[in-house]
Amino acid sequence: MHIVLTLIGLVVMAACADPDIEPIPLLDPFALTPVDADADPLVHDRPSEVDCPAATWGPEGGGFEIQTGACNYAAFDQPLSTSIQAGDTLNIALWHDTLDLAEPATGHVAVWIGGTVLWETEVAIPAPSSSFEVTVPIEDAPAPDARLGLHLHNHGFNSWRFVAVDLQRMDR
Protein backbone atom coordinates (compact mmCIF):
# COMPACT_ATOMS: atom_id res chain seq x y z
CA MET A 1 0.00 0.00 0.00
CA HIS A 2 2.79 2.44 0.88
CA ILE A 3 4.39 1.97 -2.54
CA VAL A 4 1.06 2.84 -4.20
CA LEU A 5 0.80 6.01 -2.07
CA THR A 6 4.35 6.98 -2.99
CA LEU A 7 3.69 6.48 -6.69
CA ILE A 8 0.49 8.53 -6.48
CA GLY A 9 2.43 11.30 -4.72
CA LEU A 10 5.13 11.31 -7.37
CA VAL A 11 2.49 11.56 -10.12
CA VAL A 12 0.83 14.49 -8.31
CA MET A 13 4.20 16.25 -7.90
CA ALA A 14 4.93 15.75 -11.59
CA ALA A 15 1.51 17.10 -12.57
CA CYS A 16 2.12 20.29 -10.57
CA ALA A 17 5.50 20.98 -12.17
CA ASP A 18 5.99 23.14 -15.23
CA PRO A 19 5.64 20.63 -18.10
CA ASP A 20 8.42 22.34 -20.05
CA ILE A 21 10.99 21.95 -17.26
CA GLU A 22 12.01 18.41 -16.39
CA PRO A 23 12.98 17.73 -12.76
CA ILE A 24 16.61 16.70 -12.24
CA PRO A 25 17.17 13.69 -9.98
CA LEU A 26 19.69 14.55 -7.27
CA LEU A 27 19.48 11.42 -5.13
CA ASP A 28 21.96 8.75 -6.20
CA PRO A 29 21.48 5.77 -3.85
CA PHE A 30 24.85 4.37 -4.92
CA ALA A 31 26.79 7.59 -4.15
CA LEU A 32 25.65 8.07 -0.54
CA THR A 33 28.29 7.55 2.15
CA PRO A 34 28.14 7.82 5.95
CA VAL A 35 28.81 11.27 7.41
CA ASP A 36 31.33 11.77 10.22
CA ALA A 37 30.27 13.78 13.27
CA ASP A 38 32.35 16.82 12.23
CA ALA A 39 30.38 17.11 8.95
CA ASP A 40 26.94 16.30 10.40
CA PRO A 41 24.66 19.38 10.56
CA LEU A 42 22.45 17.47 13.01
CA VAL A 43 25.28 16.41 15.31
CA HIS A 44 23.20 17.54 18.32
CA ASP A 45 20.92 14.51 17.60
CA ARG A 46 23.84 12.12 17.21
CA PRO A 47 24.37 9.52 19.97
CA SER A 48 27.83 9.24 21.49
CA GLU A 49 28.27 5.92 19.69
CA VAL A 50 26.79 5.43 16.24
CA ASP A 51 26.10 1.82 15.33
CA CYS A 52 24.88 1.59 11.74
CA PRO A 53 26.40 -1.41 9.94
CA ALA A 54 26.51 -1.39 6.14
CA ALA A 55 24.02 -4.28 6.00
CA THR A 56 21.31 -1.96 7.40
CA TRP A 57 21.36 0.65 4.63
CA GLY A 58 21.80 1.01 0.90
CA PRO A 59 20.15 1.15 -2.52
CA GLU A 60 16.79 -0.60 -2.65
CA GLY A 61 14.06 -0.43 -5.29
CA GLY A 62 15.49 2.70 -6.91
CA GLY A 63 15.75 4.56 -3.59
CA PHE A 64 17.89 4.51 -0.47
CA GLU A 65 16.63 2.34 2.39
CA ILE A 66 17.61 2.40 6.06
CA GLN A 67 16.67 -0.35 8.53
CA THR A 68 16.64 1.11 12.03
CA GLY A 69 16.51 -2.13 14.00
CA ALA A 70 20.29 -2.36 13.94
CA CYS A 71 21.11 1.23 12.90
CA ASN A 72 20.69 3.64 15.80
CA TYR A 73 21.52 6.77 13.78
CA ALA A 74 21.90 7.46 10.06
CA ALA A 75 23.54 10.41 8.36
CA PHE A 76 24.63 10.08 4.73
CA ASP A 77 25.66 12.49 2.03
CA GLN A 78 26.77 12.59 -1.60
CA PRO A 79 28.06 15.12 -4.12
CA LEU A 80 25.47 17.16 -5.96
CA SER A 81 25.16 16.32 -9.65
CA THR A 82 24.26 19.88 -10.71
CA SER A 83 24.29 23.45 -9.47
CA ILE A 84 21.33 24.81 -7.52
CA GLN A 85 20.13 28.41 -7.58
CA ALA A 86 17.95 30.47 -5.28
CA GLY A 87 14.36 30.08 -6.49
CA ASP A 88 14.76 26.42 -7.47
CA THR A 89 12.79 23.86 -5.48
CA LEU A 90 13.42 20.36 -4.18
CA ASN A 91 10.81 17.66 -4.52
CA ILE A 92 11.37 15.10 -1.77
CA ALA A 93 9.61 11.72 -1.61
CA LEU A 94 10.09 9.11 1.10
CA TRP A 95 8.09 6.52 2.98
CA HIS A 96 8.27 4.31 6.00
CA ASP A 97 6.75 0.95 6.82
CA THR A 98 4.70 0.55 9.99
CA LEU A 99 6.72 2.08 12.83
CA ASP A 100 6.65 -0.27 15.78
CA LEU A 101 7.94 -0.01 19.33
CA ALA A 102 6.44 -1.11 22.65
CA GLU A 103 7.04 2.30 24.25
CA PRO A 104 6.08 5.57 22.50
CA ALA A 105 9.01 7.33 20.81
CA THR A 106 9.76 9.79 18.02
CA GLY A 107 11.49 9.39 14.68
CA HIS A 108 13.32 12.27 13.03
CA VAL A 109 14.04 12.54 9.30
CA ALA A 110 15.73 15.39 7.44
CA VAL A 111 17.29 16.45 4.14
CA TRP A 112 20.10 19.00 3.90
CA ILE A 113 22.26 20.62 1.28
CA GLY A 114 25.63 22.08 2.16
CA GLY A 115 25.03 21.69 5.89
CA THR A 116 21.73 23.63 5.80
CA VAL A 117 18.72 21.55 6.78
CA LEU A 118 16.08 22.28 4.12
CA TRP A 119 13.36 19.95 5.38
CA GLU A 120 12.77 17.88 8.48
CA THR A 121 9.92 16.29 10.34
CA GLU A 122 9.29 14.21 13.43
CA VAL A 123 7.05 11.16 13.39
CA ALA A 124 5.38 9.65 16.44
CA ILE A 125 6.12 5.96 17.03
CA PRO A 126 4.18 3.70 16.86
CA ALA A 127 2.57 4.73 13.56
CA PRO A 128 1.07 3.12 10.46
CA SER A 129 3.05 3.13 7.23
CA SER A 130 3.07 6.52 5.55
CA SER A 131 4.71 8.54 2.82
CA PHE A 132 5.88 12.12 2.48
CA GLU A 133 5.94 14.15 -0.72
CA VAL A 134 7.10 17.69 -0.07
CA THR A 135 8.26 20.61 -2.17
CA VAL A 136 10.89 22.82 -0.57
CA PRO A 137 11.93 26.21 -1.97
CA ILE A 138 15.66 26.96 -2.17
CA GLU A 139 16.16 30.41 -0.66
CA ASP A 140 19.97 30.66 -1.00
CA ALA A 141 22.16 28.99 -3.61
CA PRO A 142 24.48 26.48 -1.96
CA ALA A 143 28.23 26.49 -2.61
CA PRO A 144 29.33 24.68 -5.79
CA ASP A 145 30.92 21.91 -3.69
CA ALA A 146 27.87 21.47 -1.42
CA ARG A 147 26.65 17.95 -0.72
CA LEU A 148 23.14 16.48 -0.48
CA GLY A 149 22.56 14.86 2.91
CA LEU A 150 19.98 12.54 4.47
CA HIS A 151 19.34 12.09 8.19
CA LEU A 152 17.28 9.53 10.09
CA HIS A 153 17.04 8.38 13.63
CA ASN A 154 14.24 6.51 15.29
CA HIS A 155 13.71 3.71 17.77
CA GLY A 156 12.55 0.21 16.93
CA PHE A 157 12.80 -2.20 14.02
CA ASN A 158 11.58 0.06 11.25
CA SER A 159 12.23 0.57 7.54
CA TRP A 160 12.48 3.96 5.80
CA ARG A 161 13.13 4.62 2.11
CA PHE A 162 14.20 7.89 0.51
CA VAL A 163 12.53 7.47 -2.89
CA ALA A 164 13.58 10.69 -4.63
CA VAL A 165 15.14 14.10 -4.16
CA ASP A 166 14.61 15.99 -7.40
CA LEU A 167 15.55 19.53 -8.36
CA GLN A 168 12.94 21.62 -10.11
CA ARG A 169 14.62 24.60 -11.74
CA MET A 170 12.94 27.97 -11.77
CA ASP A 171 12.19 29.45 -15.19
CA ARG A 172 15.45 30.83 -16.54
Image: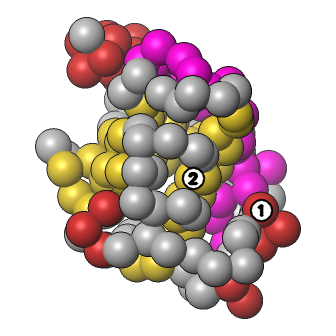
Q: Residue at x 31, y 62 (%)?
A: 56
Q: Is residue 124 magenta?
A: yes
Indicate the amino acid at tag 1: Asp
- Direction front: furthest residue: 102
Indicate the amino acid at tag 2: Leu
Q: Position of residue 125 (x, y in %)?
A: 62, 26
Q: Which residue is mark 1?
A: 45
SS at mark 1 in the image: helix
Q: Which residue is mark 2?
A: 152
For the stretch drawn in magenta, the main secondary structure is strand
Depth check, front residue: 117 or 127: 127
**Residue 42: quarter of image:** bottom right
**How far apart are the alpha carbons under marks 2 and 1?**
10 Å
Q: Position of residue 121 (x, y in %)?
A: 70, 35
Q: Residue at x 59, y 46 (%)?
A: 154
SS at mark 2 in the image: strand
Whether residue 8 appears in this view of the structure is: yes
* Label 1: how many Cα within 10 Å (few below 14, some 14–19, many 20+): few
Residue range highlighted in magenta: 112-139
Whether residue 19 appears in this view of the structure is: no
